[in-house]
Image: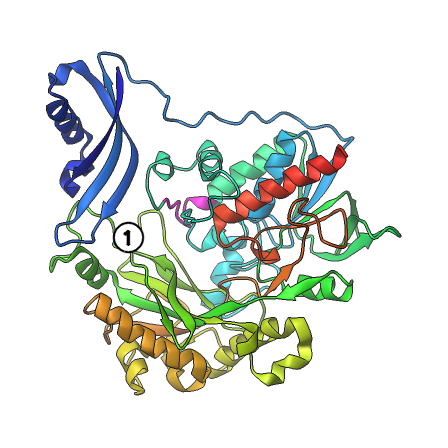
Amino acid sequence: MIKELQLRVDPRTAHFIDAVEELVAKNEGIMRRRLSGVRIVRRSIDARKERVMVNLKVRAYIDEPMRDDFIVPPIVYRPVKDDRQAVVVGAGPGGLFAALRLIELGIKPIVLERGKNVRDRRLDVAAISRLGQVDPDSNYCFGEGGAGAYSDGKLYTRSKKRGSVERILGIFYQHGASENILIDAHPHIGSDKLPGIIENMRNTILNNGGEVHFGTRVTELIINDQREVTGVKSSTGEQFIGPVILATGHSARDVYEMLYDAGVAMEEKGIAVGVRLEHPQHLIDQIQYHRSGGRGDYLPAAEYSFVTQVADRGVYSFCMCPGGIVVPAASEPGQLVVNGMSPSTRGSHWANSGMVVEVRPADVPKRFHEYGILRVMRFQEALEQRAFQMAGNSQCAGAQRMLDFVQGKPSKLIPPSSFAAGLQPSRLDQWLPQFISHRLTKGFKIFDRQARGFLTNEAIVIAVETRTSSPLRITRDSELLHHINFKGLYPCGEGAGYAGGIVSSAIDGERCAEALFQSFNV
């Protein structure tokens, strides 16, 4: 007999499977020897009350051997023929999952990535912190794996209406991710583990007849007289023929400019702008777990999520990284952008999160209006250039103690930080746009009322966080998913304005691949 049970246990019991099995046997009123095993299929932490508990969904095998029925069956990929092919621009989650789905459907994917492979990319990422050098084609945003490869690998998403989250997690698991991503309520791979998984995905593409081209930046769409996209031209002078899935991420401003010049319809959309907030992790543990001693031996590094409204705009935490580090994420020289990441262990001494304010197109200062639908993008770009200038034209970011920021005071000394490029005191409260800094100040006070001790000078704010989402949406048919005016072009993922994170981008990549497949059969 197999029974699925819901358990609510203390952290120590949840940590040891033997203890879970003993509890199941006791609750079911059976001898322990009748239980061949217990498999945890869902796990979440409830820290809302003083006593922290762990919710478990378990599968108990009574009087019969354990099975592998929990594990997601692997997808069988078969070699594709050369008679049908499609071009996938970008090797982030949207592009990689689109390519894998195309192979399932019998279409050869030709993946074009402007940056380097995920291993070689590490040197360019390191050079930003060590040397202050930004390679515009290989950085935290560009390269195999996209922005997610070196910025945490969080797999939690609320986007469940348009595709199967379980399927996406299963594909990650099939390519080397831990079984834990199938269990945890907030699954996480980690920036140290994700590159190997991405390599395995690339090998699946190559081993089944697909192509992957690095150092190949797309510069032009090939459009026929019927206004149909039939391929692309690249910076290498090559042409690649086939319908195009465009999955270039939310930071490829040159792509937006290329599309704008080609007459591809887009619309401006809001973004969020603010700072990266870093606390000592032990302080977040104390606050979230209601314990002066922190998380103890059996709880993970604590997370938080905050959201409020200030003056009719959202103020919220974004991309929270427990036990993580803050990284310099500019994609062009002369910019300064910060982001966060966590290794799989989440073992650093710090917790960080974006703390951002909703920015609508109407909020963008008038001097940017001359850029038309590109105005939000130009505003975003100008903030990053301003942050670079305020840091002395370097990647040594400006920072201010959190309470000083709220009280409008200079910070003479900045506490130790995970930010390897270095920090310097800066009056962020003065040079950030007032409608941003004012709302952040109010938001921080509200969050401190919800979590006493959150607003503290032990924490620092680091500027500037701008890459929360795409500043444009590339319009597409809501059912057929190709561009509203150009057949053969499938805008995809975060860069197209239809996703927000690894899993939702992967889901959108699969949907675009399926829509493209249908076009072959019309």
Q: Residue at x 64, y 80 (%)?
A: 369
Indicate the quadrant containing the C terminus: top left, top right, bottom left or bottom right: top right
Q: Is residue 46 visible?
A: yes
Q: Position of residue 38 (x, y in %)?
A: 24, 25
Which residues are drawn in magenta? 187-194
* Main secondary structure type of the part rendered in magenta: loop
Compared with 456, 238 (above or below) is above
Q: Is residue 179 left or right of residue 130?
A: left
Specify how the rendered protein is coloured.
rainbow
- Magenta stretch holds residue 188: yes
**125 and 151: which one is in front?**
151
Does dot 1 land on a helix, a strand or a loop? Answer: loop
Which amino acid type is marked by label 1?
Gly
**490 and 123: which one is in front?**
490
Q: Is residue 141 left or right of residue 256?
A: left
- Magenta stretch holds residue 80: no
Indicate the quadrant containing the N terminus: top left, top right, bottom left or bottom right: top left
Q: Position of residue 383 (x, y in %)?
A: 52, 77
Q: Residue at x 36, y 51 (%)?
A: 343
Q: Is residue 454 visible?
A: no
The residue pinned by badge 1 equals: 347
Q: Is residue 519 left or right of residue 37?
A: right
Compared with 504, 108 (above or below) is above
Q: Residue furthest top?
A: 63
Q: Position of residue 331 (x, y in %)?
A: 56, 65
